[in-house]
Amino acid sequence: MNVVVTGAAGFIGSTLVDRLLSEGHTVVGIDCFTEYYDEATKRANIAGALGNPNYTLAEIDLTTADLGGVFADVDVVWHLAGQPGVRLSWSAGFERYNTLNILATQRVLEAAQQAGVGRVVYASSSSIYGNAERFPTEETDLPQPFSPYGVTKLAAEHLCSLYAANWGTPTVSLRYFTVYGPRQRPDMAFHRMINAALAGTKFPLFGDGQQRRSFTFVQDVVDATHRGGMTPDVAPGSVFNVAGEQSATVTEVIDMIGEIVGSPLQLDRQPAQAGDALRTGGATERIAAALGWTATTSVYDGLTAQVAHLRTIFERDGAAPPPVD
């Protein structure tokens, strides 16, 4: 198959690319290497892919590039590119989120519709639910984002549904729940916790640590994302939760990391952040029925894999990449 992955040098994108190349597909990876975090880290993610003759890296901006030629004769586009993070989406930061999450998605969908792409798989987020009314939250429950980031992810998801309803564009939207594991972005909590534990420095804990999440291991997420593009006879405009079967509080995760690393994590307690939902938890019956997917990795096992990955980087470089400010 001929496929495209946007955000191909990122955390989930690069892991998906490796999976697709291992299966023999011809992959075009799109990434514009924004300044959100260290470019060298992202290029390290795709070092292996660049040596594969079936892989082409296109360093283009989805908001300005002519995508028609890139999408010609493409079976699946996995659209994983976007501006992540809740904290920076407020105030003047919103314009960037609006551009990279909403406009970029509209341009991907328009180009895919014009080129007759077989399917577009969009990486949405559990942030569209905000502080949901019930748990586990079902796909039919009312979305009520609690951050501007969540608003932009929901708007892009609605665009997918609209292109499906009006033009028959075969879209699938996947609502990821707190993805973690090797290659996790340096701004994300688990990366920062593990780095602090390895370095013996303090981790800034925002809030009381009782925030509860459905944590989902990256390989489980990649499996769901792969199925979203490859499973036949999925209705255009479908929306699925991608959530780990096991939830945990932030405090419980901190304790697990301390146990795995071999020393307790030191904390610098800070007030809660605006836009940080108190709890997430996704129902997965719909994705199990349609795509045959369930998460299989426990939080402890997934954390063990991420610690091993970051320990290798720490021992090689003396520290993991610095977090985003």
Image: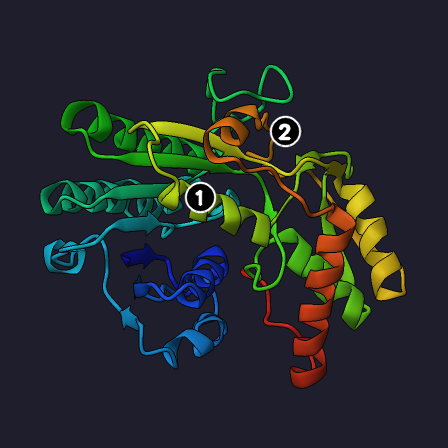
73 in relation to 172, above or below: below
Lateral position of residue 67 relative to residue 85, left or right: left
* Residue 214 percent location from the top left of the image: 65, 36
Q: Quadrant of residue 155?
A: top left
Lateral position of residue 58 relative to residue 147, left or right: left
Measure how far apart labels 2 and 1 are at the Cα level. Answer: 21 Å
Mark 2 or mark 1: whose residue is earlier in sequence: 1
Amino acid type at mark 2: Gly
Q: How many marks?
A: 2
Mark 1, secondary structure of its residue: helix
**Crowding near the residue tagged with mark 1, few <14, some 14–19, many ≥20 C-alpha atoms within 10 Å:** some
* Residue 175 percent location from the top left of the image: 47, 35
Q: In front here: 54 or 127?
A: 54
Give me the residue at 41% from left, 61% from top: 20
* Residue 4 percent location from the top left of the image: 29, 57
15 in relation to 199, above or below: above
Give me the residue at 36% from left, 28% from top: 238
145 in relation to 300, above or below: above
Q: In front here: 20 or 57?
A: 20
Amino acid type at mark 1: Arg
Give me the residue at 63% from left, 41% from top: 295
Tell me the residue that label 2 is attached to. 281
Does residue 201 appear anywhere in the picture?
no
Q: What number is the disc on residue 227?
A: 1
116 in relation to 304, above or below: above
* Residue 68 percent location from the top left of the image: 11, 54
- Which residue ends up furthest to the bottom in the rendered image? 316
**Crowding near the residue tagged with mark 2, few <14, some 14–19, many ≥20 C-alpha atoms within 10 Å:** many
Q: Give yes or no for contact between labels 2 and 1 (Cβ–Cβ under 8 Å).
A: no
